[in-house]
């Protein structure tokens, strides 16, 4: 239990901020408000499709570093054991429980809170929910209350059990697509066989996606600089057709964007041809974005191209039952199960779990960014004219800022971040494991420190973990 729980807490610490289903505290102790938190986190866990939520003492709520706690789950509240005080006022019983673990030799107490099952969880006859990281009374948010009751009554919405608002659908392009793959669909049974109906016989959202008009655009925007504040160079709109054709078109558009550059550095006879980015990594990122996108909310993936990278955004987070560690290992858990089966049947994807590892092998784990409601894959460009100097050496300030960073005070960095930055300056080729050994910190502390340095614009990692290097930006 402890090893599993430690892995879970380490996973939660990787988030940039607290989410609706977990809360970090140090020594905070208010029994009545804790009961309200149990209600809020239990309901929010159900709302977000999580099996459990967590209230954790001993973790700093800003840095997410283990700091230890003196909180005692065995304390009394006016002569009554805390656990009994809470259980007596929580309805229905959610079987919450306390666990004690140690992270980096610091004592951490974890309150594991199962998600609401049949009706919302209340404390002292009041139901609560989390709005961001705040705790609110559920009745103040009637739309959320209605959605929560719907989840508890019929289950979490999926593209299979949610009816499309469009019921006049045709599937001629889908039949042609299958035929081009050598598969002949039974024209009288394919809609049922492919799972295009809800339980009450209506076309579902998956049917809409695969129909001749998906009613959904997928845009590819190109900006002249490194951010969306720069001028937009162009925008291409794909979609409003069978999703499978939209996917093919965007993959082909990627081939157009992926210019082949002539590398004449150290040329003797033949020049080397260098693509702008890795084709296989781009393909895997696009397919994953389409396959695992949270289509049930009718929000589409988005591709944004900057002067130095491509960003591929898919809606939603890693699915229930998945961990960040398992995600990077390629232990795939499909968000849209039936759509995943169709992609597999058409040989668009495979269930080998190679997609994410292919991307990380080329660009490292830093290629992925997990946001509150989306996942972004960043594919850097390998521009030859900016990656090499006149002598043919890798550029990008590999040796650090030539001005010695005289104008940088580092006042926004904590001590761990400062020593990590100094280690990188001293050796731009240093690995994360070497940083851990050099500064005497654990993996999580180093990962978080590096993440913060990136967010604050101090460093950037170029290339993969195996062959890349650190670029000093400030």
Image (cartoon, rainbow, N blue to C red):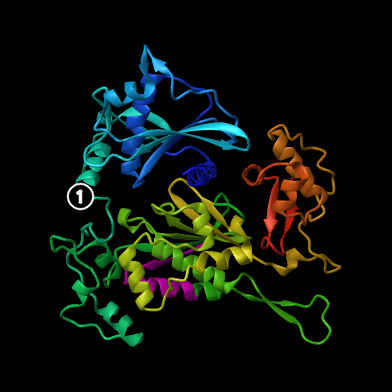
Task: Name the residue beneath numbered marker 1.
Answer: 154
Mark 1 Cα-neighbour bin, 10 Å: few <14, some 14–19, many ≥20: few
In the image as oriented, which residue stretches furthest toward the top? 78
- Is residue 38 visible in the rendered structure shown here? yes
Q: Nearer the viewer, residue 2 or 40?
A: 2
Please tell me whether residue 439 is drawn above or below residue 157 in the rendered image: above
With respect to residue 108, does 183 lie above or below?
A: below
State whether residue 437 is above or below residue 183. above
Label 1: state its secondary structure.
helix
The residue lying at 80 percent from left, 75 percent from top is 265
Q: Is residue 61 visible?
A: no
Residue range corresponding to the magenta coloring: 233-252
Task: Decide whether residue 61 is among the magenta residues.
Answer: no
Residue appearing at x 40%, y 78% in the figure? 347
Q: How many marks?
A: 1
- Pick the quarter of the image with the C terminus: top right
Q: Is residue 209 left or right of residue 462?
A: left
Task: Say if 412 sits above or below 176 in the image.
Answer: above
Residue 454, x across and y down, in percent: 65, 47
- The one of 402 and 48 positioned closer to us in this rendering: 48
- Quick one: 409 or 322, which is closer to the camera? 322
Tell me where residue 77 appears, x and y as whole percent: 38, 15
**Residue occupying image coordinates x 73% and y 55%:** 431
Residue 181, located in which quarter of the rendered image? bottom left
Would residue 309 be found to the left or right of residue 97 on screen? Answer: right
């Amino acid at each position: 239990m402890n090893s599993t729980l430690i892995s879970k807490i380490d996973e939660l610490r990787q988030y940039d901020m607290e989410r609706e289903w977990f809360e970090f505290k140090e020594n905070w102790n208010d029994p009545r408000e804790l009961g309200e938190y149990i209600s809020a986190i239990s309901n929010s866990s159900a709302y977000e499709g999580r099996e459990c939520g967590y209230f954790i003492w001993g973790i700093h709520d800003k840095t997410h570093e283990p700091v230890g706690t003196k909180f005692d789950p065995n304390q009394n509240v006016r002569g009554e054991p805390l656990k009994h005080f809470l259980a007596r006022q929580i309805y229905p019983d959610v079987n919450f429980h306390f666990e004690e673990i140690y992270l980096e030799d610091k004592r951490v107490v974890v309150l594991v809170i199962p998600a609401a099952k049949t009706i919302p969880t209340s404390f002292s006859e009041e139901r609560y929910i989390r709005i961001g990281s705040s705790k609110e009374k559920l009745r103040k948010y009637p739309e959320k209350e209605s959605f929560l009751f719907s989840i508890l009554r019929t289950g979490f919405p999926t593209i299979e059990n949610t009816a499309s608002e469009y019921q006049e659908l045709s599937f001629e392009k889908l039949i042609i697509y299958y035929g081009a793959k050598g598969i002949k669909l039974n024209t009288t049974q394919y809609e049922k066989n492919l799972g295009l109906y809800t339980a009450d016989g209506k076309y579902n959202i998956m049917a809409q996606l695969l129909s001749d008009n998906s009613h959904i655009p997928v845009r590819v925007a190109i900006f002249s600089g490194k951010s969306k504040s720069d001028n937009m160079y162009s925008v291409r709109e794909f979609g409003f057709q069978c999703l499978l054709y939209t996917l093919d078109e965007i993959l082909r558009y990627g081939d157009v964007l992926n210019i082949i550059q002539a590398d004449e550095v150290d040329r003797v006879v033949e020049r080397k041809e260098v693509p702008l980015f890795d084709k296989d990594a781009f393909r895997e990122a696009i397919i994953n974005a389409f396959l695992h996108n949270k289509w049930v909310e009718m929000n589409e993936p988005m591709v944004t191209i900057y002067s130095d990278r491509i960003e591929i955004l898919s809606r939603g987070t890693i699915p229930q039952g998945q961990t960040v560690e398992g995600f990077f290992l390629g232990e795939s858990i499909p968000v849209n199960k039936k759509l995943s089966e169709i992609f597999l049947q058409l040989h668009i994807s495979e269930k080998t779990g190679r997609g994410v590892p292919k991307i990380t092998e080329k660009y490292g784990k830093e290629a992925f960014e997990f946001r509150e409601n989306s996942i972004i894959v960043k594919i850097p460009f390998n521009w030859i004219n900016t990656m090499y100097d006149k002598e043919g050496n890798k550029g990008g300030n590999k040796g650090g800022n030539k001005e010695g960073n005289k104008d940088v005070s580092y006042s926004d960095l904590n001590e761990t971040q400062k020593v990590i930055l100094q280690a990188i300056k001293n050796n731009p080729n240093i690995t994360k494991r070497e940083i851990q050994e050099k500064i005497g910190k654990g993996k999580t502390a180093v990962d978080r420190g590096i993440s913060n340095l990136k967010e604050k614009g101090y460093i950037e990692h170029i290339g993969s973990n195996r062959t890349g290097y650190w670029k000093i930006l400030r």
